[in-house]
Image (cartoon, rainbow, N blue to C red):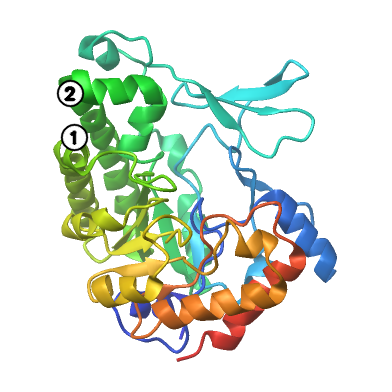
């Protein structure tokens, strides 16, 4: 099977020749630059300094030789977003920072901060819907977004890979939180629900314009589209189920339905970290085909065998390969192998599973543990 065939078979709840493998097709299935460089040196691969695929998270753009060595089945369509990989940086000696195309400010500490954290929320002090509407919103169909996209897609198609394309920005609820600031937008949802509703709805409008354009250009080659919010924290949901149903879910339903209307054959992956077990039926109901990253260390998310039994006929699982908070960074290679073998055994039978980490591989993951993760997959990936 080709990577595309393998991926599409698994996402149709059938067993391919082996489990499909994703590394770096989404900005939560990748590897940070430090871990990438450490593995490259430890293995003696001789790969060049990686380009940065995602500035905020400092994700490495994996060299094609590493992807081929690992037999990764997916490739990202990286065109579409702007203002991240080519950001203009400023510095005061303590921090470096940049402002993205949405007006969000991101900074990291110098000299060796690992990530850029959000520190400026451009809509935080705007008083009403009229002021929000007058904001200088980015153009989701700016032609510059799509320059070179056909050549990028043609290359991946020629290699037989499963193509994965993402939205123009983070998810509609997450973007509202970022643009207004978490405190302000939680207040909006409770005390100014009309404003909160307008802002999330406007994000859907912008996203649908982008999705119609990008899928019109290359949708016939795409296997997977993804959207992402973080609905869960470590121990609980970040929004009550009632408020989610009133203010977030209707907008997500409209967004997901729109994506599928533009390319009915694609599967929709939804990313949300955290303790979101109680919302899984809701997500299935609004069109989510696959859930990522399956944060097994979050409350209620650890029993992956039960999750597969309960939801596996309707939902695919993309991730969940090994606990990324304790086992992968702090365990021994033997513990990584044991954990990875268990998760594959829970999630893979019958299809409906794509092997990927629980979010991005972080800087504190040793090359030996990373090697244990990937070698265990090779040993266990057959059906």
Closest to the observer: 345 or 40?
345
Q: Is residue 169 left or right of residue 33?
A: left
* Image quarter in which the C terminus is found: bottom left
Q: Name the residue located 60 percent from the left edge and 83 percent from the top edge.
A: 378
Confirm whether residue 45 shows in the render.
no
Splitting the image into 4 quarters, where does residue 94 fall?
top right
Q: Is residue 15 left or right of residue 37?
A: left
How far is disc 2 from disc 1 in space, using C-alphas? 8 Å
Confirm whether residue 291 shows in the render.
yes
Q: Is residue 242 left or right of residue 356?
A: left
Q: Name the residue located 33 percent from the left edge and 29 percent from the top edge.
A: 176
Q: Name the residue located 58 percent from the left edge and 56 percent from the top edge.
A: 325
Label 1's element? helix
Splitting the image into 4 quarters, where does residue 179 fall?
top left
The residue labelled by disc 1 is 247
Where is 189 relative to 172, above or below? above
The residue labelled by disc 2 is 193
Closest to the observer: 67 or 292?
292
Where is 238 relative to 108, above or below? below
Label 2's element? helix
Mark with earlier residue (2, 1) = 2
Q: Name the residue located 37 percent from the left edge and 29 percent from the top edge.
A: 177
Residue 358 marker: none
Whole-percent x, y for residue 380 in the image: 55, 86
Whole-percent x, y for residue 326 in the image: 61, 59
Where is 192 relative to 87, above or below? above
Tag 2 and tag 1, C-beta contact below 8 Å: yes
Q: Residues within 10 Å of mark 2 (few under 14, many from 20)?
A: some
Closest to the observer: 7 or 79?
7
Q: Residues within 10 Å of mark 1 (few under 14, many from 20)?
A: some
Whole-percent x, y for residue 348 in the image: 41, 80
Whole-percent x, y for residue 118 in the image: 53, 28
């Amino acid at each position: 099977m080709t990577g595309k065939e393998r991926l599409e078979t698994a996402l149709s709840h059938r067993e391919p020749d082996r489990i499909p493998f994703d590394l770096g097709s989404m900005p939560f299935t990748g590897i940070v630059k430090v871990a990438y460089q450490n593995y490259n040196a430890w293995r003696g691969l001789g790969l060049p300094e990686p380009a940065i695929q995602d500035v905020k998270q400092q994700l490495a753009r994996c060299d094609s030789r590493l992807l081929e060595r690992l037999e990764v089945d997916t490739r990202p369509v990286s065109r579409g977003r702007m203002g991240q990989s080519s950001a203009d940086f400023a510095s005061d000696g303590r921090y470096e920072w940049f402002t993205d195309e949405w007006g969000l400010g991101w900074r990291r500490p110098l000299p060796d901060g690992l990530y850029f954290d959000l520190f400026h929320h451009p809509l935080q002090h705007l008083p009403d819907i009229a002021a929000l509407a007058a904001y200088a919103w980015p153009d989701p169909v700016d032609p510059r977004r799509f320059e070179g996209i056909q050549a990028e897609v043609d290359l991946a198609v020629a290699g037989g890979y499963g193509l994965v394309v993402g939205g123009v920005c983070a998810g509609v609820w997450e973007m509202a939180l970022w643009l207004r600031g978490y405190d302000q937008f939680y207040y909006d949802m409770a005390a100014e629900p009309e404003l909160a509703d307008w802002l999330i709805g406007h994000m859907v409008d912008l996203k649908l314009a982008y999705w119609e354009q990008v899928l019109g250009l290359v949708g016939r080659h795409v296997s997977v589209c993804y959207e992402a919010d973080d609905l869960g924290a470590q121990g609980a949901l970040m929004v009550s189920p009632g408020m989610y149903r009133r203010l977030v879910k209707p907008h997500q339903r409209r967004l997901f339905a729109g994506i599928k209307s533009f390319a009915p054959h694609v599967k929709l992956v939804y990313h949300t970290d955290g303790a979101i077990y109680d919302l899984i039926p809701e997500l299935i109901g609004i069109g989510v085909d696959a859930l990522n990253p399956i944060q097994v260390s979050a409350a209620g998310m650890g029993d992956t065998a039960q999750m597969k039994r309960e939801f596996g006929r309707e939902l695919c699982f993309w991730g969940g390969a090994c606990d990324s908070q304790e086992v992968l960074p702090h365990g021994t290679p033997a513990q990584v192998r044991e954990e990875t073998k268990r998760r594959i055994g829970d999630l893979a039978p019958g299809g409906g599973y794509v092997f990927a980490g629980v979010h991005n591989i972080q800087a504190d993951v040793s090359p030996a543990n990373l090697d244990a993760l990937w070698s265990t997959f090779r040993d266990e990936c057959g059906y």
